[in-house]
Image (cartoon, rainbow, N blue to C red):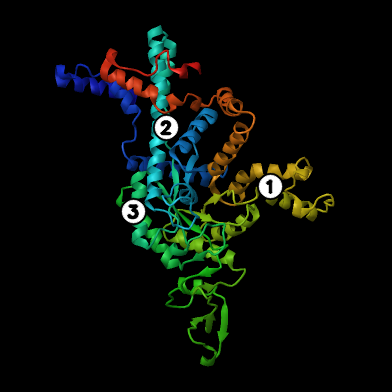
Amino acid sequence: MSAYQNDIKAVAALRETAGSAWSAINPESVARMRAQNRFKTGLDIAKYTAAIMRKDMAEYDADTNAYTQSLGCWHGFIGQQKLISIKKHLKTTNKRYLYLSGWMVAALRSEFGPLPDQSMHEKTSVAALIEELYTFLRQADARELDLLFTDLDAARSAGDKSKEAELQAKIDNYETHVVPIIADIDAGFGNPEATYLLAKKMIEAGACCIQIENQVSDEKQCGHQDGKVTVPHSDFLAKINAVRYAFLEMGVDDGVIVARTDSLGAGLTKAIAVTNEPGDLGDLYNSFLDGDYIDNASDIQNGDVVIKANGKLLKPARLASGLFQFRKDTGIDRVVLDCITSLQHGADLLWIETEKPHVGQIAEMVNKIREVVPNAKLVYNNSPSFNWTLNFRQQVFDAMQTEGKDVSSYDRAKLMSVDYDETELAQLADEKIRTFQADAAREAGIFHHLITLPTYHTAALSTDNLAKGYFADQGMLAYVKGVQRQEIRQGIACVKHQNMAGSDLGDNHKEYFAGEAALKAGGKDNTMNQF
């Protein structure tokens, strides 16, 4: 017997116990409401989605074709519509997640207005967005199930037993819109205690996976901008531990931690690491510092710092800001050390922030990491900060040149030009872009591919397309042709915006509560009937 049928039976028994006072309560209506509210708390969601991620990670280890994907979002409605679209077109949410981008929280959710990605926004807005996303995903469940219940009632009224059985099976085997969210906690918004407190709020809101980066909290920069400052490993590991303690305290024992390293593009550190003996983590971190080896005290100037490194006295290069500088061309080695250290001290997945999407570059680092941690896996930022067209056209150009092919008709510096759009090189580059995620999953250990800021850009693009026609000479045709007609043709559920906002769902509830006396909004005069 299905959970739905069990609930009907259980509520019927309760009603019987309550006697005539509950005579107006319909057990099947209660069962429907329970089905529409499967997840009662954020912790229910966190536990459910953590199990999904763990299963997906194991399946990826067995088969690299089983990688996962997500798109970043900045509002509950955006996340909801993504999952509705996934279910409509792909029939299942399997291995499809959501990403909560700290960049978009800063740019679109702060009470200060648009902010750069520097952890200046209210940290509580991160947990608030997680809660909002899951509120909208749960509402998507309630709405879709309500449509099934309405169709079930219609099949019963028509005496169509076959259709009734088909709809009942869909209800009994319903797949929720609730999926894992990989949630960005930036650099932890302060010291480890602050990180722990915020992580708890995020988990309470439903987060099963928290991503944290090894930058200094008060110097944090977007991963694709300059001026990034990393912290010694001991500082970062304390924050990983803080997140793990938060998961365990909240009872999400299989919560997932993504340890992000920005070391590839970060040339600075705020602190010299504490070291107790040669070869320990602090010593290894300091070994990458730029500076001059000195022989005597006369080489030390006022305010200089001197440490013992590699058996010698090193005067690290110190900038006017008080920050210390790493040697050039040490980024890859620092990334590898960061990743191995994080995995050996509690992290589950890695994030390596790169300056371009290049399978070979990522694979070089991952292969070194896997020499020590064989099952190391990455979450990778398929970032809109990359010029994907130019990057991949240049990669193809370089490959063609290496193979001895004639590339004289191309200007490598101008390959973004529309003049090249129909060329063989452009077509080869587009195919590499299309297969990038599968190629990187197979060759570079990437378990999860995400785009951080897609809906930031799609919102701007679609608004621009509407505005340029509507405020010019097209008027309503710009909206009707470019938006509404496309919604109708493509079966976009939001064309019935009253239904999407819960009007029909509310009507059915009114009928549960008041029977024939219910005042319903969905009658014959509702203009949504035009659709």
Amino acid type of the residue that numbered disc 1 sits on in the rendered structure:
Thr
Q: CA distance from mark 2 to mark 1?
A: 36 Å
Q: Position of residue 516 (x, y in %)?
A: 29, 12
Q: Is residue 466 left or right of residue 340?
A: right
**Direction top: furthest residue:** 159
State the residue position of label 3. 246
The first of marks 1 and 3 along the sequence is: 3
Image quarter of the N terminus: top left
Residue under the image location 79 percent in, 53 percent down: 411
Question: Pointers 2 and 3 in contact (CB under 8 A)?
Answer: no
Q: Nearer the viewer, mark 2 or mark 1?
A: 1
Q: Give the numbered dot on residue 173.
A: none
Query: Nearest the camera: 206 or 459?
Result: 459
Q: CA distance from mark 2 to mark 3?
A: 26 Å
State the residue position of label 2. 176
Residue under the image location 71 percent in, 45 percent down: 429
Q: Position of residue 72 (x, y in %)?
A: 50, 44
The first of marks 2 and 3 along the sequence is: 2
The first of marks 2 and 1 along the sequence is: 2
State the residue position of label 1. 389
Q: Nearer the viewer, mark 1 or mark 3?
A: 1
At label 1, counting other C-alpha atoms closer than 10 Å, the crowd grade (few under 14, some 14-19, many 20 or more) is some
Q: Position of residue 272 (x, y in %)?
A: 47, 74
Compared with 469, 150 (above or below) is above
Residue under the image location 58 percent in, 48 percent down: 382
